[in-house]
Image (tube, grey):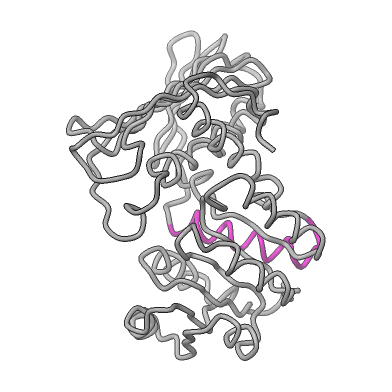
């Protein structure tokens, strides 16, 4: 497991766009972690990304990278539908893994990977960087202080026009698997609670290519009583971006660079977010490395993230059946 006193050697599997974010994040902390190897089935992508960031060890074969690169940890940023064939060999090689979200396309596959990691005693974390890139973690701290009272309702609109290319457009699960999974995880983090039931409806708009859900409306009932209402669209010409938390004695307005706390007496208190996207991304990796060294679960461990994937799975099941789905149904 990684030595916390030395620079950790990290390999990245998947040299697509998201790998740049991880490389930029590590470049800010060269004394803590550096990428020593890249792996991808596309030699052009390997040459481009390796040349851009000065990574000399590149591999077309995962098993060769595992055997030769002497890794302390690996980041998996492949397409979602090949998770098992990448993450499982790394677990078998005793390499701690940071896996991009969503953890897997389905809850069943995510549960299989989590079980393999747990049985092998290898830490696996999920790249839920929106816990800090968005202001969910600040909101969690403020709600825990108690002066806002009990959280009752969370309302979020995340609507924009997005036109992806590549493998995502070939998958049946789209908006919720690409982006809503971040919000589902953020609600769990902020509320320090688990979901009880989910109801989802969706549309498939000609405004943008994509799977069966280019826009969704999701209602989540949490065990502690809070109700979350999410409207998310990749097919919206009228952009909207707002997340409001209603409590008994105040409220919160969440954003990326800051959070606004609204007191019952009308005072508005601004809380700056110290994390931009690269820093929030590095935080997840750094926590995995520290967790591996201390033999403890990471904040975004595979076991924890099953709760977020379970919400996504329940939402897609609700979409298919037209009814609310209890989280106990997802196994």
* Residue at (62% x, 91% y) in the render: 68
Q: Which residues are magenta?
A: 278-296
**In the rendered view, does 174 fall on the left or right side of 13?**
left
Judge whether 255 appears above or below 76 on screen: above
Q: Position of residue 17 (x, y in %)?
A: 36, 65
Magenta segment, prevailing SS (helix, strand or loop):
helix
Residue 280 inside the magenta-drawn segment: yes
**In the rendered view, does 114 fall on the left or right side of 50?**
right
Could you say which quadrant of the image residue 194 lies in? top right
Please state which of residues 331 and 307 is positioned toward the viewer in this rendering. Answer: 331
Please state which of residues 323 and 232 is positioned toward the viewer in this rendering. Answer: 323
Residue at the front extreme of this rendering: 321
* Residue at (36% x, 32% y) in the render: 232
Please state which of residues 282 and 161 is positioned toward the viewer in this rendering. Answer: 161
Q: Position of residue 225 (x, y in %)?
A: 64, 15
Q: Quadrant of the N terminus?
A: bottom right
**How many numbered circles are shown?**
0
* Residue at (59% x, 28% y) in the render: 142
Residue 251 inside the magenta-drawn segment: no
Q: Position of residue 244 (x, y in %)?
A: 43, 22
Please state which of residues 124 and 295 is positioned toward the viewer in this rendering. Answer: 124
Could you say which quadrant of the image residue 207 lies in? top left
Judge whether 7 appears above or below 293 on screen: below
* Residue at (51% x, 45% y) in the render: 132
Judge whether 61 appears above or below 279 on screen: below
Q: Position of residue 253 (x, y in %)?
A: 42, 25
Q: Quadrant of the C terminus?
A: top right
């Amino acid at each position: 497991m990684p030595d916390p006193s030395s620079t950790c050697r990290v390999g990245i599997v998947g040299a697509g766009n998201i790998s740049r974010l991880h490389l930029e994040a590590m470049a800010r902390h060269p004394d803590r972690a550096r990428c020593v190897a890249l792996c991808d089935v596309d030699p052009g992508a390997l040459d481009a990304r390796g040349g851009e960031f000065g990574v000399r060890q590149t591999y077309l074969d995962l098993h060769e990278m595992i055997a030769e690169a002497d890794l302390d940890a690996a980041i998996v940023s492949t397409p979602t539908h090949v998770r098992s064939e990448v993450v499982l060999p790394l677990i078998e090689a005793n390499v701690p893994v940071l896996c991009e979200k969503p953890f897997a396309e389905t809850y069943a596959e995510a549960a299989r990977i989590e079980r393999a990691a747990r049985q092998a005693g290898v830490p696996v974390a999920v790249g839920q960087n929106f816990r800090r890139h968005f202001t969910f973690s600040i909101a969690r701290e403020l709600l825990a202080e108690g002066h806002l009272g009990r959280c009752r309702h969370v309302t979020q609109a995340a609507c924009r026009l997005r036109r992806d290319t590549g493998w995502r457009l070939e998958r049946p699960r789209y908006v919720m698997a690409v982006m809503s999974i971040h919000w589902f995880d953020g609600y769990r983090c902020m509320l320090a609670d688990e979901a009880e039931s989910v109801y989802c409806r969706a549309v498939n708009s000609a405004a943008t290519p994509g799977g069966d859900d280019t826009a969704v409306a999701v209602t989540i009932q949490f065990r502690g009583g809070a109700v979350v209402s999410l409207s998310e669209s990749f097919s919206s010409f009228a952009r909207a971006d707002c997340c409001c938390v209603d409590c008994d004695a105040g409220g919160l307005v969440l954003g990326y660079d800051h959070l606004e706390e609204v007191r019952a007496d009308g005072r508005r208190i601004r809380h700056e977010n110290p994390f931009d996207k690269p820093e929030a991304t590095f935080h997840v990796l750094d926590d995995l490395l520290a967790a591996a060294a201390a033999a403890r679960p990471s904040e975004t461990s595979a076991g924890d993230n099953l709760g977020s994937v379970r919400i996504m799975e329940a939402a897609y099941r609700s979409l298919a059946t037209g009814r609310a789905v209890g989280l106990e149904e997802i196994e």
